[in-house]
Image (tube, rainbow, N blue to C red):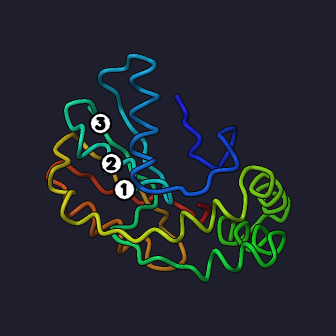
Amino acid sequence: ITIDPRGGGASQRNVETITLESGVHDLLAVVDHLDIRRFALLAQYPYHAPGLMFAARYVERVVRLAVWSPRVAQQGRPDIGESARANWGMYTRAAATLFFPTGPAEAQRLYSNAFRSGTTPDAVANVFDWTYDLTPLLPELTMPVLVLYRKHAQGNEAEQARTMASLMPNAHLMAIEGDVG
């Protein structure tokens, strides 16, 4: 089951605010509606934080957890939202370059177009306004956890993944070859 977060994919577009808590509630609503009592969960950046919060709050329901490209903490970045709102086309092209740093150009173009049609500048701004520190809840995630990151990712992705894995009792860290997000 794949869930599109508020403001993205096939989900509702025009939402005033996308919060960490709304992400937890949305996930709970979907699994309850489908009567799924126990399941494996993939939490992927930037929406991994609500997934991890859900797993900590409902630890009896999440049997296994995979986390892709995690961030242990995030300080709100209103500058990202401002950039998205100022020039949506340029922002989505820049995001595609970050996601596919070494190309190919066709993949960057397809990603940029899908991103542009799959969300809105306001939704991006909401998500990057989030401020969180997941450190206190990570030791509560006692299920088997696989923390995945790109071996050649830009920025501090590897450091964040190592930190996250070190704080969870049953975590395994795995570097994936390449630089594609």
Residue 101: quadrant of the picture? bottom right
Which residue does the image show at 43% across and 54% down from the upper left? 48
Q: Which mark is residue 64?
A: 3
Residue 24 image offset from top left, x and y in percent: 39, 44
Mark 1 residue type: Met
For mark 1, give the secondary structure.
strand
Q: Which residue is mark 1?
A: 174
Seen at 85% across and 59% down, the residue is 106
Q: CA distance from mark 1 to mark 3?
A: 15 Å
Marks 1 and 2, Cα distance to the nearest angstrom? Answer: 7 Å
Neighbour tally class for label 3: few under 14, some 14-19, many 20 plus, Cα within 10 Å = some
Say above or below: 51 vs 165: above
Q: Are marks 2 and 3 in contact (CB under 8 Å)?
A: yes
Mark 1 near mark 2, Cβ–Cβ under 8 Å? yes
Q: Earlier in the sequence, mark 1 or mark 3?
A: 3
Residue bearing the label numbered 2: 146
Left or right of residue 72: residue 130: right
- Closer to the camera in the image, 89 or 109: 89
Q: Earlier in the sequence, mark 1 or mark 2?
A: 2
The secondary element bearing badge 2 is classed as: strand
Between the C-alphas of marks 2 and 3, the distance is 8 Å
